[in-house]
Image (cartoon, coloured by chain):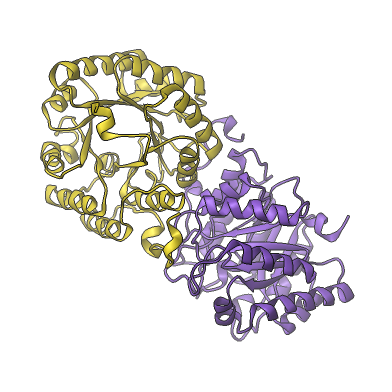
Chain colours: A purple, B yellow
Amino acid sequence: MSPLSRIYSNDRVTLREVGLRDGLQLVKIWPDTSAKIEWLKREYSAGVRHFEVGSFLPPSRFPQFADLPVLLEAIASLEGAYSAVLALNDRGAEEAMQSVADEIVCVVSATEEHSQANMRRTRADAVSLVGKIAAMRDDAAPQKIINAGIAMAFGCSIAGTVNQTGVLKLAEACLDAGADIVGIADTVGYAGPRQVGEMCRAMQKLCGDRPFIIHLHDTRGMGVANAAAALDNGARVLDGALGGLGGCPFAPGATGNIVFEDLVFLCETMGFSTGIELEELKSTRLIAENAMPGEAFYGALHKAGAPAISEWKA
Amino acid sequence: MSPLSRIYSNDRVTLREVGLRDGLQLVKIWPDTSAKIEWLKREYSAGVRHFEVGSFLPPSRFPQFADLPVLLEAIASLEGAYSAVLALNDRGAEEAMQSVADEIVCVVSATEEHSQANMRRTRADAVSLVGKIAAMRDDAAPQKIINAGIAMAFGCSIAGTVNQTGVLKLAEACLDAGADIVGIADTVGYAGPRQVGEMCRAMQKLCGDRPFIIHLHDTRGMGVANAAAALDNGARVLDGALGGLGGCPFAPGATGNIVFEDLVFLCETMGFSTGIELEELKSTRLIAENAMPGEAFYGALHKAGAPAISEWKA
């Protein structure tokens, strides 16, 4: 079994919980290491298996990710759990390579303007970095997979409209450079369900049997509707953050990632079994809420609970 | 042109704003009459044309609806605006008949248990009341339309599972009894998008050229996804409440109706022109928020605004 198919498959729906990474990107208060580990373990016990937990960045500037190696060890100790980390430059890639992370995530912007503003490099340089990191992986850590995430894939708050063909070309370039899997991100929540459905059909065509990832933000309330459209059009790996945590420096005032709990409920109503228990997820949310006082948490499912009928899972 | 086709058509999407009715059903503080009129006028200026604004019930028990006749007169003074009111018994029906309301809404429950708990009558008696009110209308106010709303159409928090065939039979019985249009309501937010899509296809088959209404609650975060599924499957008249106001005595702790602002955004991204301006809607929301301190308002669009690209309207 290839490292990719060990972690992801198109035969089932996989939900990646990115709260401890994307959810902590901009916060002023974050859970301490023991609360983070409690969060991970509780979610694991709820059935979550895919965790994106941080970014290898200088701890002086991003202290919320300083304990990343400890979290990776904690995930490695949970049978069948997988960890993903961001590596945004050479140094980050080296640290990621030496860590026990299963997946290294690189970010490529769909627009030149966002690429410069966010990463201070061109899109071509970002794709080259994907290639460099993939080569490092081939040498040093062949069991790890490389995930290239394309930010602003549905519209950019700096450059404006993003055309689908350009995103697909970038996705193809990342795969050619050695990425195992590509993600497409609605970083600033510009998309509606029709646009998401069309993009997913095109991505499915591009990727063939290989899964792709969709990463949605609920900036304009379309998160769950976009996820439904993605699932209807071939997406099988979706990101979400506990309580809808997460913002974006390029989307001021924005609601965060799609709410993980509501996403689980959506999948189950659509007949995609997630293996995740909603009640246990609610208790994970309490851990996060207690650890992050003053932070906005979103979502509806945690308040109402699942319907009081056995047939709600399709 | 028939009274029905004057108000609703399958050739366009119509959004009914029900905040001043469903949104005020359970609140302890409500806007005074002048704030309600400001709300209506600002929404009208944003482009909203369909308002459900109250229920003819004893003012001693439902003081939030005591000013209903004044609101109906205010709507009647706005060119091309339409008003809907609930009439839940004979006396309410008589008052509605004498009012300037364009549409009288009757409620029928999908389950015997909810019918008894909510209205203290059987479903058969509720359908008979629809017939009686339709006959009163034929005699006294032939320009008004009768709307029969089927509550708990996607699952019932008292009786449990609701089967689609039963709902369709009830819808047919309401049309046979003289209703001009039928609405189906996910009163307690049990549905997911697949169930909503299937029900809408079946309703479209039942209703033929005649439009039907879908009324969604965001109890479990599925509101916008369910609206997208409804639009994809033939629904052309959808309810929403400003700020997602509204609860349900049978859905404790629940988030309210689908957020009207987010619903407008959804429709536009899907290529259904609503004629509604989002910025003006945001200022209507401020009126409501100021008039109802302490009340929970939901939604995301009002925070982020529309995307900064001209192509966001499909």
Is A34 drawn above or below residue A298 in the view shown? below
The answer to whether one can see residue A49 in this image is: no
Q: Nearer the viewer, residue B88 or B84?
A: B84
Residue A95 image position (x, y, % from top left) = 76, 79
Q: Nearer the viewer, residue B33 or A235?
A: A235
Q: Nearer the viewer, residue A46 or A200?
A: A200
Query: Looking at the image, which residue is at 45% across and 61% down?
Result: B311
Quarter of the rendering containing residue A62 = bottom right
Quarter of the rendering containing residue A118 = bottom right
The N terminus of chain B appears in which quarter of the rendering?
top left
Query: Looking at the image, which residue is at 57% across and 54% down?
Result: A196
Residue B281 image position (x, y, % from top left) = 29, 56
The C terminus of chain B appears in which quarter of the rendering?
bottom left
Is B171 drawn above or below residue B267 in the view shown? above
On screen, residue B145 versus residue B9, left or right, reads: left
Quarter of the rendering containing residue A17 = bottom right
On screen, residue A107 versus residue B271, left or right, reads: right
Number of numbered callouts drawn: 0
The answer to whether one can see residue B156 in this image is: yes
On screen, residue A271 versus residue B111, left or right, reads: right
Residue B97 image position (x, y, % from top left) = 15, 24
Is A314 drawn above or below residue A6 in the view shown? above
Single out the residue that lies furthest toward the bottom: A60
Residue A238 image position (x, y, % from top left) = 64, 55
